């Protein structure tokens, strides 16, 4: 397997705690959609922060394309549970923010931002301000902002947790299409087992700071909504559920 993001025997504890991430090795290939699931408090967000250079491991190594990760880089995009848009900027300017922070925005980048907004069903909303959008629309803007620089890897921490089921499945579909077209690798945290199976090429189940189970989701791409009602899909959900229950 060609290697891209690699975590090797990574350990981390916050001050005064025994261990939070305890000897995790994880390999994410180029274009791989990797989901991380596990019970609340098992260390998922901490592991994502270690993978993205937002925290430094106390032992072990994190490398991106062979280079040690010591801080977040321009190669990385982020989407968190709260969309964290800047309320004084329009939708278009929020999407262009990662570029504007580093210099003047070129016409082609404007066009790219508009195209992303179109792909995410936000055409006609580029001049609105975040408070004039629904929660789902704000999440879409956050995804467009994360993808505007076409980062090779996207880190997503429960980005759809606060959305209704239908909006959520629409966003899953849009995210898969965008990542597929840009060849983006993704590390995606969710509590939703079905979301993990639908999105992922690989799922890692975390328990008490370690990875207790891994599943390669060998279901056909592109994923279609009808897949959710198949026996193959449900068998993989059941396997992950058992892994989370500790009964595998
Ligand atoms: N900044 C911090 N300082 C001290 N302890 C922390 C800090 N952040 C998280 N923890 C602790 O580390 C453990 C793992 O937290 P983490 O946020 O990684 O869990 P999680 O799996 O993402 O949980 P959730 O599903 O609820 O988001 C928890 O026991 C938590 O209380
Ligand atoms: Mg978390």
Image (cartoon, helix red, strand yellow):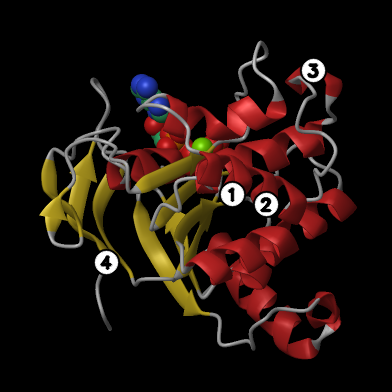
Answer whether labels 1 and 2 touch (C-beta < 8 Å).
yes
Kind of element beneath mark 4: loop
**Rounded to the nearest whole Å, what is the CA distance between mark 1 and mark 3?**
23 Å
Of badges 1 and 3, nearer the viewer stands 1
| Numbered label attached to residue 3 | none
Label placed on residue 131: 3
The residue labelled by disc 4 is 4
Q: Quadrant of the N terminus?
A: bottom left
Q: CA distance from mark 2 to mark 4?
A: 28 Å
Total marks drawn?
Answer: 4
> Closer to the observer: label 1 or label 4?
1
- The answer to whether the residue labelled 1 contacts the one labelled 4, judged by CB atoms less than 8 Å apart, is no
Q: Is residue 150 left or right of residue 89?
A: left
Asked whether residue 82 is in view, the answer is: no
Determine which residue is flagged by label 1: 112
Which mark is in front, 2 or 4? 2
Q: Indicate which disc, 1 or 4, sits on the residue closer to the N terminus.
A: 4
Give the SS element for disc 3. Answer: helix
Q: Which residue is mark 2?
A: 115
The front one of 185 and 58 is 185
Mark 3 crowdedness (10 Å alpha carbons): few <14, some 14-19, many ≥20: few
Cα separation between marks 1 and 2: 5 Å
Answer few, some or many: residues within 10 Å of disc 2's Cα (few below 14, many 20 plus, some between 14 and 19).
some
Give the CA distance from mark 3 to mark 4.
38 Å
Residue at the spot 67% in from the left edge and 14% down from the top edge = 87
* In-image side of 220 versus 214 (left or right): right
Which of the marked residues, 3 or 2, is nearer the chain's N terminus?
2
Task: Compare marks 3 and 4 and give the one earlier in the sequence.
Answer: 4
Q: Nearer the viewer, residue 199 or 235?
A: 199
Do tag 3 and tag 2 residues touch (Cβ < 8 Å)? no
The residue sitting at 64% across, 79% down in the picture is 236
The residue under the point 56% across, 87% down is 218
């Amino acid at each position: 397997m060609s290697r891209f993001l690699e975590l090797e025997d990574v350990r981390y504890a916050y001050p005064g705690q025994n261990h939070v991430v305890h000897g995790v090795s994880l390999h994410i290939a180029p274009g791989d959609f990797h989901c991380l699931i596990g019970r609340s408090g098992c260390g998922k967000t901490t592991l994502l922060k270690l993978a993205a250079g937002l925290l430094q491991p106390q032992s072990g190594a994190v490398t991106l394309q062979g280079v040690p990760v010591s801080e977040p880089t321009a190669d990385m995009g982020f989407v968190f549970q709260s969309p964290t848009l800047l309320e004084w900027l329009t939708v278009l300017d929020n999407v262009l923010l990662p570029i504007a922070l580093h210099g003047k925005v070129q016409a082609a980048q404007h066009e790219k931002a508009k195209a992303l907004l179109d792909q995410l069903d936000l055409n006609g909303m580029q001049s609105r301000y975040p408070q004039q959008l629904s929660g789902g629309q704000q999440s879409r803007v956050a995804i467009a902002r994360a993808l505007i620089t076409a980062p090779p890897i996207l880190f997503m921490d429960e980005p759809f947790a606060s959305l209704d089921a239908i909006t959520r499945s629409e966003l899953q579909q849009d995210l898969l299409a965008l990542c597929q077209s840009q060849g983006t690798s993704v590390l995606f945290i969710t509590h939703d087992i079905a979301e993990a199976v639908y999105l992922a090429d690989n799922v890692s189940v975390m328990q008490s700071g370690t990875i207790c189970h891994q599943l390669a989701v060998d279901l056909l791409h592109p994923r279609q909504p009808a897949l959710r009602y198949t026996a193959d899909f449900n068998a993989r959900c059941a396997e992950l559920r058992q892994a989370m229950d500790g009964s595998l």
